[in-house]
Image (tube, helix red, strand yellow):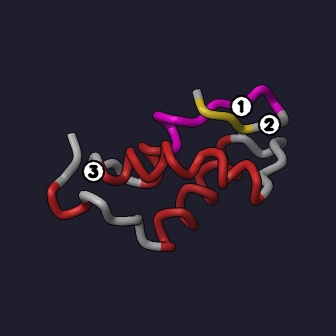
């Protein structure tokens, strides 16, 4: 359920910085490109709008096959 205060809003840049930090730590062998983040962004934004932290949003939406991070 989208938080009213976050409805139609984008997360702050720090949210994505925290997501990237979590993903680098969780999947150290994965290549994290700008394109990969762009692919994940809509799902991460939706999680943020639903009140999730960066870590929880990344855990809820991301999976890795060892080299590539994708939407789970």
- Looking at the image, residue 66 lies above or below residue 56: above
The residue furthest bottom is 13
Q: Which of disc 3 and disc 1 is earlier in sequence?
A: 3
Identify the residue shown where x is 72% and y is 41%.
27
Distance from disc 2 to disc 1, alpha carbons, whole Å, reads 6 Å
Identify the residue shown where x is 28% and y is 46%.
50
- Looking at the image, residue 27 lies above or below residue 64: below
Q: Mark 3 points at which residue?
A: 51
The residue furthest front is 8
Locate the C terminus by quadrant. top right
Distance from disc 3 to disc 2, alpha carbons, whole Å, reads 26 Å
Tell me the element at label 2.
Answer: loop
Q: Name the residue under label 2.
A: 68
Callouts 3 and 2 close, C-beta under 8 Å: no
Distance from disc 1 to disc 3, alpha carbons, whole Å, reads 24 Å
Q: Measured from the top left, where is residue 23 in percent x and y?
A: 64, 48
Tell me the element at label 1.
Answer: strand
How many other residues sit within 10 Å of disc 1, few (<14), some (14-19) or many (≥20)? some
Callouts 2 and 1 close, C-beta under 8 Å: yes
Residue range of the region highlighted in magenta in the rendering: 58-66
Nearer the observer, 56 or 70: 70
Q: Measured from the top left, where is residue 24 in percent x and y?
A: 70, 52
Q: Measured from the top left, where is residue 66 in percent x and y?
A: 81, 30
The residue furthest left is 4
- Looking at the image, residue 8 lies above or below residue 52: below
Q: Name the residue under label 1.
A: 64
- 30 left or right of 43 in image: right
Q: Does the magenta stretch include residue 15?
A: no
Q: Is residue 63 magenta?
A: yes
- 60 left or right of 36 in image: left
Q: Which of disc 2 and disc 3 is earlier in sequence?
A: 3
């Amino acid at each position: 359920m989208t938080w009213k205060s976050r409805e139609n809003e984008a997360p702050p840049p720090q949210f994505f910085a925290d997501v990237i930090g979590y993903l680098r730590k969780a999947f150290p062998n994965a290549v994290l490109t700008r394109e990969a983040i762009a692919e994940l962004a809509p799902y991460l934004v939706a999680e943020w709008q639903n009140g999730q932290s960066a870590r929880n949003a990344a855990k809820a939406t991301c999976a890795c096959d060892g080299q590539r991070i994708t939407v789970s």
